[in-house]
Amino acid sequence: MLTFDFITLATRISNGWAIFRPLYWLFGKCMEFLLAGFNNNYFLALIVFTVITRVILFPINLRQQKTMAKTNRIQPKIQKIQKKYNVNSIQDQRQRQKANQQMQQEIQDLYAREGHNPMNMGCGPMAFQMIFLMGIVGIIYYPLEYILGIKITDYSEKIAELINFTATRGNSYLQLDIIRNIASYKDTLLANNDALGGIFGGDAVQRIEAFRDSLNIFGMNMSQIPTWKSVTVIIPILCLLTSLASSVMSTLIQKKTNPAMAQQNNQMLIMMLMMPVFSAWFSFQVPAAVGFYWIISNIVAVAQQLIMAKFFPPRRNIAREMIENTIERRSRENSIKITKG
C-alpha cells in the first residue's frame, strides 16, 4: 500500500508544474510534428527545434544590443555628472546624501532628455531563454503526456503502484521510468489497461518503444541523468565548453561596445565563468536531453553573435543611435518652439 507522501510525489512528478503546462503542450506539439517529419529521429528533431527557438529569440537579442549601444553612448555624460558631484569625496554624511540625491536626479533628467530607459536592457533575453528551457524540460520529463499524447495524469498514482515505481536520482520521473523500462512494464500495463482508462490500448506501447529507441543518440540514452562514470558525462563537458565559447564571444562584443569594460578584468572574468559553470552543474541534475538542447543552443548563440557582429556591429549601432537621438531631440525642440509660438 502506498503512503500518502508517496502518492503525492507520484502525482506531482507525473504532472509537471501547472503554470508551465500550456508551454509543455505547445512544445510537445512542435516536437511531435518534427519527429513525424524526421522519421522519429529525436536527434534531428531536437536540433531543429533548438534552432527555431534561437531564431525566435534573435530579435530580442538584437534589441538588447541596440539598447546597450544607447547606454554606452550616454555613459560619458553620466561620468561627467558623477565627476561633478564627486559624492565619495564628501565627508559629511548629510551633505553626501544631498549631493547623491542631486546627482541621481540629474542622471534621471539626462535619461528623460535622451529618451532612454536603462532598465530595458535588463534580463529580458535571459528570462525568455529560461522560459524556453522550462518548456524543453517539460517535454523531456513528460513525453508520454505532451509528445505521444498518452494521458496518464489521472492514473499516475495507480501506475506508480502497479510498477512499484521508486523516486530516486536518475530515475525520479514516472514517465521517463516507464519509457526506459517499457519492456519490463508492458505486460503489467496491458493487463491493467481497462483499469487505467484504456490509455495503453492500441499501439500506445509500440509508440512508447519506438520513442525509447529514438532517445539513444551516439550510444547515449538521452533520458538518463549524466554521471561521471557513464558516457553521458560528455554532455556536461560540452555544455561547459560551448557555454564558455558563447560567454567569451559576448564579452568581446561588449568590450567593443564599451571600451571601459576592458578595465574591469576581474569582474569580467567572474561573469564570463559564472554561466558556463552553472550550465555544467545543471546538466548533471537533469536528463542528458536537456544538456544536449543547451549545447545546440550555445552553438547557435555563437553563430548569432557572429552574425550580429558582422551585420550589426556595435560601433555602427552607436553611430546610428547618435543620429536617431539627434533627429528625435531636434523634433522635440521644434515641437516646443511651435507650442510656445
Image (tube, rainbow, N blue to C red):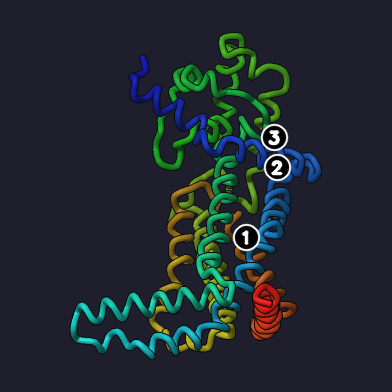
Tell us which disc is closer to us: 1 or 3: 1
Direction from residue 196 to residue 266 in the image, left or right: left
Give the answer, above or below, for where 41 lies relative to 69. Answer: above
Task: Identify the amino acid type marked 2.
Answer: Met
Quadrant, the C terminus = bottom right
Measured as percent of width and height from the top left, residue 249 is found at 58, 77
Measured as percent of width and height from the top left, residue 213 is found at 66, 39
Direction from residue 73 to residue 268 in the image, left or right: left
Residue under the image location 71 percent in, 37 percent down: 29
Measured as percent of width and height from the top left, residue 227 is found at 44, 52
Task: Identify the amino acid type marked 3.
Answer: Ala
Secondary element at tag 3: helix
Foreground: 166 or 329?
329
Give the answer, above or below, for where 282 lies relative to 118. Answer: above
Give the answer, above or below, for where 232 lies relative to 178. Answer: below
Label 2 – label 1 distance at C-alpha:
16 Å
* Residue at numbered disc 3: 210
Quadrant, the N terminus = top left
Find residue 30 and report its image quarter: top right
Task: Identify the amino acid type marked 1.
Answer: Ser
Q: Residues within 10 Å of mark 3 (few under 14, many from 20)?
A: few
Secondary element at tag 1: helix
* Residue at numbered disc 2: 31
The numbered disc on residue 309 is: none
Foreground: 93 or 73?
93
Q: Are marks 3 and 2 in contact (CB under 8 Å)?
A: no
Residue under the image location 45 percent in, 42 percent down: 170
Direction from residue 40 to residue 237 in the image, left or right: left
Foreground: 229 or 76?
76
* Residue at numbered disc 1: 297
Q: Residues within 10 Å of mark 2 (few under 14, many from 20)?
A: many
